[in-house]
Image (cartoon, rainbow, N blue to C red):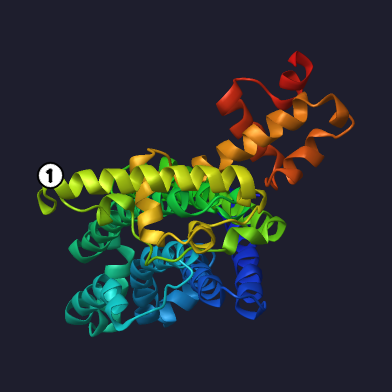
Amino acid sequence: MDIDSFLSVMGRMSVFVSLLLAFFLFTVKTQNKLANRLFASYLLFFVVDDIGIFMSEAFIKDYLNLEFFRWTTCALVLPIFYLYIISVCFADFRLRTKHLLHAIPFVFINAVFISSIYFLNDVDKMQFYEQRSQMPEFYFLQLMLALQIVLYSIGVFLVLKKYKEIYRENYTNPKTSIFKWLFQISTVFFSLYYLSIAKNILRFTDFEVLWIWANVIMQFLALVATCWFVLKALNDPELFRGINSKLQLTRDILPKENESAVETKELQNDLITAQISTLKKYMAEKEPFLDPSLTIQELSNQIDIPVRDLSILINHHMEQHFFDFVNEYRIQKAMGILKNPLKKDLTVLEILYEVGFNSKSSFNTSFKKYTNLTPTAYRNAS
């Protein structure tokens, strides 16, 4: 089997897996339909790009305008991936008319192609296709796509940064956090996209063999990444839960320094001290942290402090994220159980569920953060 045939086989496999997953995402019954459909759309545009690897030359020559248009659809891939990331992070995300702005590069590229390529005669179209690497329009397309990769990679990781900060200030359940997953998939995908920039640079050089092998490597990595996504998504449906994007970060809702007079500040300090005391007493006596899905909104309702004030109280005045604040109480509760000789028959797994965790890995991470010991080592040392 020669390199072209091997590349064609991998391309067909990648297309098959992508289509299979896209079909599943379009048809599966789930609460987060928008996120699934956006990713399915991303996969379909990925397929449109990928089929060029094994399309026959005869078919391309018969439908050159269709082939040129296929090139331009690459400009829609990253915008859809970006919207997918937002839709998974924020459960209240909805597509709006303003999101059509992401299609501007696609429309602009097609406008360029309409004015210079689409209406050429068949001979000139074929000449353009065969010599595309030397054509300014094709060079412009590659430059536009490379710029998209840079801008959308920045945009995606800024969204993930905001999601992580909001999550830690408002939620405690590690199983509902999808940050790690989205960070992984974004890192993998954009690594591939940046490698594709390097690969496309080879297109404009005389290293034809290196260009062919670069295509083989990229196709193999794309196939692996697609299969990895399928397995990961099927094994952990919790990855598709989001948070409310209308939640604000504490730094965004804190009053400005010049908004309060000295006397007002003193009154506020007294109020803050009283609220902290009330909060700590409530946490110790009522133990709301035993609820693994506790959110700052739920705690606000229980303690009768407005959620905005409670967020500022914990995240700013107590200098802890809500996530860490609640987990500290859980760890203290677990430490008491681990030291209790009457409960020595309880396993670590039973203890972590009892104190409000629902993940062994997150419990071990949090426990070691506060004690510098694993739960087992702490029990043995007690």
Q: Nearer the viewer, residue 42 or 258?
A: 258
Depicted 373 relative to depicted 128: above or below: above
Residue at x-position 84% and y-position 34%: 347
Left or right: 201 in relation to 135 = right
The answer to whether one can see residue 31 in this image is yes
Q: Count residues near mark 1 (Cα–Cα under 10 Å), then give few for <14, some for 14-19, many for 20+.
A: few
Q: Nearer the viewer, residue 247 or 62?
A: 247
Which corner quadrant of the image does residue 13 belong to? bottom right
Residue at x-position 29% and y-position 54%: 146
- Give the farthest residue toward the top: 381
Which corner quadrant of the image does residue 109 belong to? bottom left
Residue 6 position in % (x across, y down) = 61, 52
Residue at x-position 65% and y-position 64%: 17
User: Which residue corresponds to mark 1?
Assistant: 262
Under mark 1, the amino acid is Val
Residue at x-position 39% and y-position 39%: 318
Q: Which quadrant of the rendered structure holds the C terminus?
A: top right
Depicted 105 relative to depicted 193: above or below: below
Which corner quadrant of the image does residue 99 belong to? bottom left
